[in-house]
Image (spheres, rainbow, N blue to C red):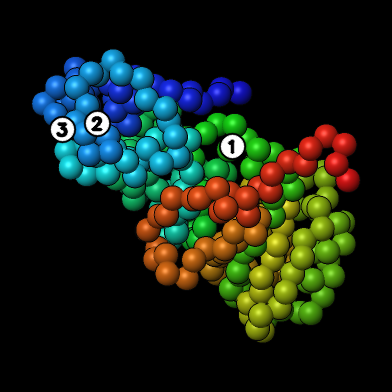
Amino acid sequence: MSKLPTTLRLDRLLANLGYGSRREVQGLVKAGRVTLDGTALSDPDQRLSLAPDLADRMRVAGKPLDPPPGVALMLHKPLGVTCSHKETGPLVYDLLPERWRRRDPALSTVGRLDKETSGLLLMTDDGGLLHRIISPRSHVSKRYHVTLDRPLKGDEATIFASGALMLDGEEKPLLPVAMETVSETSAAVTLMEGRYHQVRRMFAAVGNHVLLLHRDRVGDLDLPVDLAPGQYRILSEADLALVLPPAKPVGAA
């Protein structure tokens, strides 16, 4: 698992963030267009500490520096957008600033939401963080709000919580899933796994069909009500602690 650097040369930092080639960003620096704490930087070879406040202190052409490597964000994924770098049609990466598509390391989605599912999607360029969140050992829960084609029968919550439900074509039962009835044709389900189209297939297994699917929570991190579809927000350390609580010290109870 690669480890993010703690310092970088100025020209490499800006090139990795998509501001241009090394030669182009060297030109920006020598033209006095890169400042730190209000003072123009003149040496492209200068090494900088990738401190959390660097984006607040540095300006490029008068605008705040893009988030340095190690960024994590939440995106309110709209319907009809795909979590992919390669597929045709609208992609989640198209919702981010154009320059961010040239970042190195690249931003990746933390897991996926299918094209017809909306809601909370996490993205990061930190491979270690990504794998910790998606690892089954981390037990990170996901909550989905489901709108159904037909009324609930009343036994779905018991079936989902049993840990015995088998999906078509699989040989291992699902882990228990918590379900809360919201209305006659809607529910909220919280699961610890992420099998292919799991929620849709769960309801198909009990004779229903999912019309709309929306994820509003990962771990204890909620999708903010003021974050509109297509918008994103950088995650703070406090936000990340809601997704993935810090590991306990060895020997802790």
Give the position of the C terminus as an image quadrant.
top right
Q: CA gap, disc 3 to disc 1?
A: 33 Å
CA gap between label 3 and label 2 equals: 12 Å
- Image depth: mark 3 or mark 2 in front: 3
Q: Where is residue 99 in the image (x, y as percent from the top left)?
A: 27, 37
Quarter of the image for residue 220 reads bottom right
Per the image, the residue denoted by label 1 is: 129
Q: What residue does disc 3 label?
A: 33
Kind of residue indicated by mark 1: Leu
Secondary structure of residue under mark 1 = helix
Q: In this view, does 202 lie above or below 158?
A: above
Query: Which residue: 52% across, 58% down?
Result: 120
The amino acid at mark 2 is: Tyr
Residues marked 1 and 2 touching at CB (< 8 Å): no
Q: Neighbour class for label 3 at 10 Å: few (<14), some, many (≥20)?
A: some
How far separated are the C-alphas under marks 1 and 2? 25 Å
Q: In this view, does 89 lie above or below 85?
A: below
Q: Residue at x 49, y 61 (%)?
A: 118
| Contact (Cβ within 8 Å) of mark 3 with mark 1 | no
Assign a secondary structure to mark 3: loop
First-in-chain label (3 vs 1): 3
Residue at 59%, 37% in the rendered image = 129
With 102 as the anchor, is 220 left or right in this view? right
Is residue 24 among the parts visible in the rendering?
no
Between discs 3 and 2, the one toward the N terminus? 2
Q: In front: 232, or 117?
A: 232
Q: Can you tell which mark lies on residue 19?
A: 2
Give the structural element (helix, strand or loop) at label 2: loop
Q: What is the three-letter code of the residue carrying label 3?
A: Arg
Please count the marks in the image: 3
On screen, residue 191 above or below 152: above
The mark that comes first in sequence, 1 or 2, is 2
